[in-house]
Image (cartoon, rainbow, N blue to C red):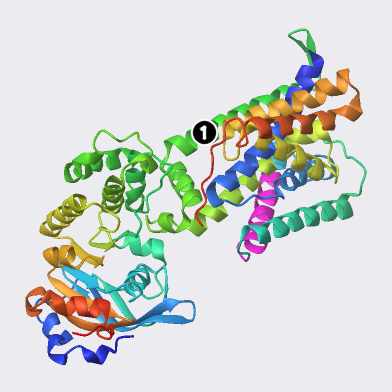
């Protein structure tokens, strides 16, 4: 297992420097300790997501990225630390209320309702807004503009869409709730490179519209291409954090992925 | 034709049991084995309200709805919420059913109690067959409830939310749906409906402590024939079971009626394992 200490201290941007850019971050995670039941998987993670910016949460399999997202969404136990969304402390707030408070969650594995039609999936995405069905139907157009591939497939059961379209539907579903913060868990997993590009383009569009995005990825290049801030997790701890520009070489991140102690001669 | 009317009325009751199973099943993926006992409790409360307390009809309906609704919520909180896993729920919901069977027997005894029908009781001659007004009401109510169920699940946000919860609880939670409220709401709704049906079913079946288990079995067959989770299926399945029971009872003898029902179930399960209107339910492992 990689010792977090092996990453040069100079690579770690201090939190204070990050926080000085804008007074109030959209999402602020401080000293988060989270896991499943009594099992702790993530220790002392701190990072921010700002309006109109992408924070990429990187790390290899099992580093604790998904656990961190789930803890922010309220699906996993938060042992200690704080999660603040738009100034609101989310401690003790049940998951469905976090969604209503402006959290948009796209879970891994293109988690759409496969037996329901594309339109029903999207309408359901707007459930948290608690507005009339007709008003939700007006919002559908915005999603179809972002993802033209979904247009014309409104009546198709989501399970019959291609993997890429299901991912777009999953993102569209979260967007229907008009979130302030969008959390994406491995949106590129299992997709063809061309489709990954399409998904990342939509991330850029959303970012330009002012949405804050927390992006969990294993595809380092794709994530770094859209990210403003990077936080790298390894074995449940933040080993590197800072603006994209402050990290000179992707190889350093990749090292954190594959571990220094690969046992291969350099 | 008289046996057809009788069979349809009986079938309507089975369909109503199956619909009750569906309301809960669709919204929380729980098969509530005590659903028929809730209907039975409704007939007892109807007897208690109309005969013992001599309350006006409207109050009897209200009483049934409130009492059975509350019992259903109690069931959700004690026999469902605390339990994890389908196998556990099988035991606890059957346990709750047994509890209701026993309690009603302790309170009201084992003898069938006649629940008076609040409407006209004169036999009607319809399509050259004899039919009681209460039988027509039962058939009508079953059809209306099945259609209402379809309208809600297909046409409203609540319905879409219910289906979402049944397909993927956690994903539904991540769409801002209060999954717990939906689950308890479905139980309350199924309970209230079961209660409201008490004064309608009681006149046909009598209030008797064995009613629950016989309705549970045939309601289950109705649901299996029609397909799990399908309201039209519950209706068709219910009518089919009722008709098979009354017709085979007439032509083959009473002792054959239950046998024929299970023969029909076997045939349907062999030829269409998901029932007539059901769909395959994928499971992730």
Q: Is residue A29 magenta?
A: no
Q: Residue furthest front?
A: A265
Name the side, left or right, on which B186 lies relative to A47: right
Q: Position of residue A195 (x, y in %)?
A: 20, 50
Q: Quadrant of the N terminus of chain A?
A: bottom left
Quadrant of the image occupied by residue A141: top left
Name the residue at 32% across, 80% down. A82
- Please say if B96 is above or below B63: below
Report the magenta stretch's main SS: helix
Q: Is residue B110 visible?
A: yes
Q: In the structure shown, which secondary structural element does the residue marked by tag 1 occupy? A: helix
Name the residue at 87% across, 51% down. B105
Name the residue at 41% across, 45% down. A114
Quadrant of the image occupied by residue B96: bottom right
Name the side, left or right, on which B142 lies relative to B134: left
Between A222 and B29, the residue placed more toward the observer is A222
Q: Position of residue B47 (x, y in %)?
A: 81, 41
- Please say if A111 is above or below B60: below
Between A241 and B57, the residue placed more toward the observer is A241
Instruction: Report the span colored magenta.
Output: B62-82
Between A178 and B170, the residue placed more toward the observer is B170
Name the residue at 91% across, 23% down. B253
Q: Residue furthest top?
A: B128
Name the side, left or right, on which B233 lies relative to A80: right
- Please say if A20 is above or below A66: below
The residue that disc 1 covers is B150
Parent chain of label 1: B
Q: Position of residue B180 (x, y in %)?
A: 51, 59
Q: Position of residue A134 (x, y in %)?
A: 30, 37
């Amino acid at each position: 297992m990689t010792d977090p200490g092996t990453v040069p201290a100079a690579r770690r941007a201090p939190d204070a420097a990050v926080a000085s850019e804008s007074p109030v971050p959209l999402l602020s995670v401080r000293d988060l300790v989270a896991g499943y039941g009594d099992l702790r998987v993530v220790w002392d993670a701190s990072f921010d997501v700002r309006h109109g910016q992408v924070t990429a949460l990187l790390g290899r399999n099992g580093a604790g990225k998904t656990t961190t997202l789930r803890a922010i969404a309220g699906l996993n136990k938060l042992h200690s630390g704080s999660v603040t969304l738009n100034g609101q402390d989310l401690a003790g707030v049940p998951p469905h209320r976090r969604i209503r408070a402006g959290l948009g969650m796209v879970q891994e594995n293109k988690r759409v309702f496969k037996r329901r039609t594309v339109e029903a999936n999207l309408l359901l995405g707007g459930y948290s807004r608690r507005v009339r069905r007709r008003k939700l139907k007006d919002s559908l157009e915005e999603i179809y503009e972002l993802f033209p591939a979904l247009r014309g497939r409104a009546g198709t059961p989501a399970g019959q869409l291609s993997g890429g379209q299901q991912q777009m539907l999953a993102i569209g579903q979260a967007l229907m709730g008009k979130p302030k913060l969008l959390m994406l868990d491995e949106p590129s997993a299992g997709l063809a490179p061309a489709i990954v590009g399409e998904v990342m383009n939509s991330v850029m569009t959303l970012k330009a519209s002012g949405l804050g995005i927390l992006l969990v990825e294993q595809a380092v290049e794709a994530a770094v291409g859209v990210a403003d801030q990077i936080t790298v997790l390894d074995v449940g701890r933040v080993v590197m954090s800072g603006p994209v520009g402050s990290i000179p070489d992707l190889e350093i991140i990749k090292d954190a992925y594959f571990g220094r102690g690969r046992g291969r001669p350099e | 034709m008289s046996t057809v009317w009788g069979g349809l009325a009986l079938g309507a009751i089975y369909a109503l049991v199956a619909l009750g199973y569906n309301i809960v099943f669709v919204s929380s993926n729980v098969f509530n084995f005590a659903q028929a006992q809730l209907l039975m409790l409704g007939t007892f409360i109807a007897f208690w309200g109309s005969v013992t307390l001599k309350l006006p009809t409207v109050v009897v309906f209200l009483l049934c709805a409130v009492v059975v609704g509350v019992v259903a919520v109690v069931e959700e909180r004690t026999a469902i919420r605390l339990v994890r896993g389908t196998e556990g729920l099988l035991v606890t919901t059957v346990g709750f059913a047994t509890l209701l069977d026993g309690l009603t027997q302790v309170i009201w005894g084992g003898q069938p109690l006649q629940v008076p029908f609040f409407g006209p009781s004169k036999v009607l001659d319809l399509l050259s067959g004899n039919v009681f007004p209460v039988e027509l009401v039962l058939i009508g109510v079953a059809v209306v409830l099945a259609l209402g169920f379809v309208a809600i699940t297909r046409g409203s946000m609540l319905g879409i939310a219910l289906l979402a919860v049944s397909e993927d609880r956690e994903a539904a939670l991540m769409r801002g749906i209060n999954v717990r409220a939906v689950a308890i709401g479905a139980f309350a709704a199924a309970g209230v409906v079961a209660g409201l049906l008490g004064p309608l079913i009681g006149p046909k079946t009598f209030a008797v402590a064995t009613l629950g288990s016989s309705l549970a079995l045939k309601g289950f067959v109705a649901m299996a024939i029609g397909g799990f989770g399908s309201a039209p299926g519950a209706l068709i399945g219910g009518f089919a079971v009722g008709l098979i029971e009354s017709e085979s009872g007439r032509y083959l003898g009473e002792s054959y009626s239950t046998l024929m029902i299970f023969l029909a179930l076997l045939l349907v399960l062999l030829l269409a394992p998901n029932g007539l209107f059901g769909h395959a339910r994928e499971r992730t492992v």
